[in-house]
């Protein structure tokens, strides 16, 4: 177990190093999110209806996560993949990818939320509770798209595949997340919306456990 | 002769049950319920399609798991063919449901958790077929498809479990609508409904077995060439 933890630590640090060296990629994704938000701002002008404001935010998050997370596997070259294969266990690779993508996605989600609030006036009643939903929701999005992009990577690196494989299976999470953040948006009593937060966490756990169990089969050639 | 009978009896049973479903389904005495009226007979043709589909999808997932633990490619053929036939059942369930909805609710498609669940199921399996089609190497295709099949099926079940709690359904028996629940389903309906599930499912299994044989023959022929 100590060996696995060590491997994961090194792999996560490696991910950060690669990201730092290719700052261009991450900046590109930030710009992608910013442009999307700006397009929404110019087309919608003003969103006063809380459910619409909320749904729009999560749709932007969905597309952001497809792009941000799927690059994780898709940008790896075949040679480098073979190198990891000889160095680390499949479990360590998926756990480190999951951990890194979740951290990245939470960070991106918080930045996007700041931009989104800037352009489309923030109407959230219960801010800490909403942010908790953003964190739990982006965890699930990141985890699901990590696994889906691993599948797409094995299937000849097809970019469209990530979206068509991912969208239908991400729906349960999206629906609960949208419901939960809607409740935070209008300021429902926290005890009443706690159930939904638990369901989101449960879905996150299910996605992570499934990825952990299934990834080794995918990885071994 | 005896050996042959062993493989044949369940096919005879399937035919008998489906014939019984169609004849009894159209003639059995049904409770007089508002809105539903005679369309309650769709219970034997529409609802049973979903049962058949979910059973076939479950078979598909079980064979995907078997493939991952054994790497025996015949398991992958069963998994893929069950999913295909499951989709056939799903399409028929959707078609029978849409016709019924048009005459009962007045529209071909309404926002209803059961309809959305069906639509998502179909999207998942279409994605599964696209995924299979995007790979040429059979071993790799089998492995990647099995992983997606299991991953998607678990989340799909969660989705179908969560969805009804999120919104109210228009379906008979839900949200105070009369229909398929313990109070409205008379013993006479059940006498047709349960055999109908078994009959249609056996039909599905039969189609799967034929498709698997066909596929296996095609693969063997390819290898000989």
Image (cartoon, coloured by chain):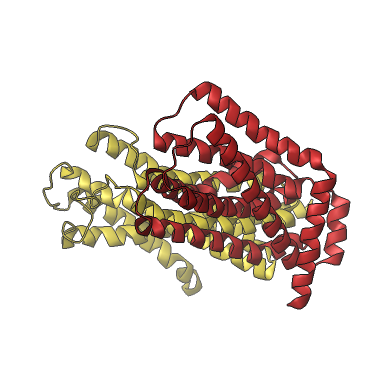
- Number of marks drawn: 0
- Name the one closer to the observer, B203 or B4: B203
Q: Is residue B87 visible?
A: no
Q: What residue do we see at 88% from left, 59% from top? A: A83
Of residue A204 and residue B74, the one placed in the foreground of this image is A204
Looking at the picture, does residue B76 appear above or below residue B3? above
**Observer able to see residue A115:** yes
Residue B77 point in image, percent of width and height:
62, 57
Q: Is residue A171 left or right of residue A19?
A: left
Q: Is residue B166 left or right of residue A115?
A: left
The answer to which of A103 and B169 lies nearer the viewer is A103
Q: Nearer the viewer, residue B84 or A56?
A: A56
Horizontal and vertical percent for residue B86?
48, 52
Identify which residue is drawn at 29% across, 62% down. B194
- The chain that appears yellow in the image is B
- B193 vs A126: above or below: below
- Please report the residue visible at 31 percent of the width from the left and 49 percent of the height from the top: B45
Provide residue A133's location: percent of width, then percent of height: 50, 51
Chain A, colour shown: red
The spot of residue B46 in percent (x, y) is 32, 48
Outermost residue to the left: B32
Residue A178 as seen in the image, left or right of residue B223: left
């Amino acid at each position: 177990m100590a060996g696995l933890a060590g491997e994961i630590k090194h792999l996560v640090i490696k991910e950060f190093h690669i990201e730092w060296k290719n700052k261009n990629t991450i900046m590109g994704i930030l710009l992608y999110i910013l442009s999307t938000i700006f397009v929404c701002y110019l087309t919608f002008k003003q969103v006063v209806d809380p459910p619409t404001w909320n749904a729009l935010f999560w749709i932007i998050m969905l597309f952001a996560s497809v792009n941000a997370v799927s690059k994780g596997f898709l940008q790896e070259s075949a040679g480098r993949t073979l190198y990891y294969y000889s160095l680390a266990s499949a479990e360590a690779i998926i756990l480190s990818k999951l951990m890194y993508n979740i951290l990245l996605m939470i960070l991106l989600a918080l930045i996007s939320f700041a931009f989104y609030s800037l352009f489309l006036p923030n109407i959230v009643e219960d801010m800490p509770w909403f942010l908790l939903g953003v964190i739990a929701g982006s965890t699930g999005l990141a985890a699901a798209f990590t696994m889906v992009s691993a599948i797409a990577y094995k299937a000849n690196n097809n970019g469209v595949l990530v979206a068509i494989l991912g969208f239908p299976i991400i729906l349960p999470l999206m629906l609960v997340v949208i419901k939960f953040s809607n409740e935070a948006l209008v300021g429902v009593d926290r005890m009443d919306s706690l159930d939904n937060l638990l369901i989101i966490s449960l879905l996150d756990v299910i996605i992570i456990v499934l990825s952990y169990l299934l990834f080794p089969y995918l990885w071994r050639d | 002769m005896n050996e042959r009978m062993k493989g044949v009896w369940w096919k005879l049973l399937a035919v008998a049950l489906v014939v019984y479903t169609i004849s009894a389904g159209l003639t059995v005495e049904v409770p007089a319920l508002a809105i539903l009226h005679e369309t309650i007979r769709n219970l034997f043709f529409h609802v049973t399609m979903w049962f058949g589909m979910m059973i076939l999808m479950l078979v598909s997932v079980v064979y995907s798991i078997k493939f991952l633990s054994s790497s025996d490619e015949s398991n992958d053929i069963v998994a893929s063919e069950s999913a295909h036939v499951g989709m056939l059942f799903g399409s028929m369930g959707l078609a029978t449901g849409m016709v019924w909805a048009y005459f009962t609710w007045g529209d071909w498609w309404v926002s209803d958790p059961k309809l959305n669940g069906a639509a998502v199921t179909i999207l998942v399996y279409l994605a599964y077929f696209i995924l299979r089609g995007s790979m040429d190497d059979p071993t790799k295709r089998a492995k990647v498809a099995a992983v997606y099949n299991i991953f998607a099926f678990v989340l799909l079940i969660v989705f179908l479990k969560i969805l009804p709690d999120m919104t109210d359904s228009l379906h008979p028996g839900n949200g105070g609508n009369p229909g398929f629940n313990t109070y409205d389903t008379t013993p006479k309906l059940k006498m047709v409904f349960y055999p109908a599930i078994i009959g249609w499912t056996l039909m599905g299994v039969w189609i799967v077995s034929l498709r698997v044989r066909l596929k296996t023959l095609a693969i063997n022929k390819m290898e000989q060439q």
